[in-house]
Amino acid sequence: MEIRVLGALGVQLCGASVVPTAPKPRQVLALLALRADQVVPAGVLADELWCGRPPRSARTTVQTYVLQLRDLIDRALARGREASDAACAKDVLVTSAGGYMLNSGGGLVDLREFDRLAGYGYRAMDGGDFPLAARQLGEALALWRGPAFADVPVGGQLAVEAKRLEETRLCALDQRIEADLRLGRHRVLLAELTVLVDRYRTHESLHGQYMVALHRSGRRGEALEAYQRLRNTLVRELGMEPSAGLRRLQRSILLAAPERPDQEQPGELGDGVAGRPARLARIG
C-alpha cells in the first residue's frame, strides 16, 4: 500500500487508487491514512465528519462509509491479489475495539518518510554537516505536493492536523535554507526566498534569511527595505514590533560595510518557531 497525505490524498493498493470521490468517505479515509496502523475510534471519526455534533445515526453512517471504502479496497485487491499479502478488505481496513485501522502493510507512508528524512537532516545540522543536512531536508520537502489534505473537506480533527503538518514543513524548510546559507548559496536562494517572504508575510525567520541572502549578494539597501516592509506588516496586522534578534540583524546590516557579492560568510539562522527565530544569522 502507498499512502500520501502531504498534498492531495492518495491511497493506492495493488496499483489502484482506493480514494472515494464522495466527500465524507474521503474524510474518513484521510483520517485513517494520517494515523495509518493505529486504531482511530469511531467517535473521533464522527467528530471529524460532523464537527463535534454527530447525529444519532452517526455510528451507523460511519459503518456505511467504512463499507464503501472496503468495496474500493476489494476491487483493488481483485485486480492484483498476487501483489498483496492481504486476504480481503477487512485485513486492510481493520475493525478493532471501538474503531478502525488502516493497515499499511509496511508500504510507503509519505508522512513517515518525511519525518525520517527530516530527522536525519536535523541531526546533521546539529553535527555541523551542512551538505548532508541540506540534502536530507531537501529530500524530505520534495515529498510535499501541496498543502496537506489539499482535496479533502476538513473538520476539526483534520484542520488541526493540517496546521500542525504545515508547521513541520516550515520548520524543515527553515533549516534547509539555513544549511544552504551556511554553504554560501545565498545567491541561489534569492529567487526562492523572494517567493517565500511574499507568501509568509509575517514569518520572521524567512525574512531574516532573505535579508542575509540579499546582504551577502551585495544588495544591502534591499535587505534593509525587506526589514522595513516586515516591520510595517507586523505593526499594521499584529500590533507588534520585530523580535530583538531581527532588530539586531537589521542594525548589523545597517552598520556593516557593503559585502562583495561573492563573499561567503557563515550564518547562524536558527530554529524558527511560529515565525519567530531563536537566533538570526550573523552577516559577517
Image (cartoon, helix red, strand yellow):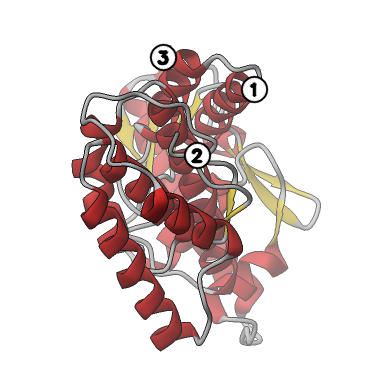
Q: Quadrant of the C terminus?
A: top left
Residue 105 placement, left or right of 76: right
Circle 2 residue: 282
Mark 3 is surrounded, within 10 Å at the Cα level, by few (under 14), some (14 to 19) or many (20 or more) other residues, namely few
For the residues carrying marks 3 and 1, which lies nearer the camera in this image?
1
Residue 181 placement, left or right of 205: left
Query: Please, what secondary structure does the residue beneath circle 2 have?
Result: loop
Q: Earlier in the sequence, mark 3 or mark 1?
A: 3
175 is higher (above) or lower (below) than 106: below
Circle 1 residue: 123
Q: Earlier in the sequence, mark 3 or mark 2?
A: 3
65 is higher (above) or lower (below) than 13: below
Q: Quadrant of residue 149?
A: bottom left
Mark 1 is surrounded, within 10 Å at the Cα level, by few (under 14), some (14 to 19) or many (20 or more) other residues, namely few
For the residues carrying marks 2 and 1, which lies nearer the camera in this image?
2
What label does residue 83 carry, if any? 3
The residue positioned 34% from the left and 31% from the top of the image is 142
The residue positioned 36% from the left and 40% from the top of the image is 144
User: What is the x, y in percent for residue 214?
Assistant: 26, 44
Which of 29/9 is in front? 9
Q: Earlier in the sequence, mark 2 or mark 1?
A: 1
Which of 187/115 is in front? 187
Query: Please, what secondary structure does the residue beneath circle 1 have?
Result: helix
For the residues carrying marks 3 and 2, which lies nearer the camera in this image?
2
208 is higher (above) or lower (below) than 64: above
The reply to whether discs 2 and 1 touch (Cβ–Cβ < 8 Å) is no
- What's the distance in space between the residues labelled 2 and 1, CA to CA? 22 Å
- What's the distance in space between the residues labelled 3 and 1, CA to CA? 36 Å
User: What is the x, y in percent for residue 236?
Assistant: 39, 87
User: What is the x, y in percent for residue 213?
Assistant: 31, 40
- What's the distance in space between the residues labelled 3 and 2, CA to CA? 54 Å
Query: Please, what secondary structure does the residue beneath circle 3 have?
Result: helix
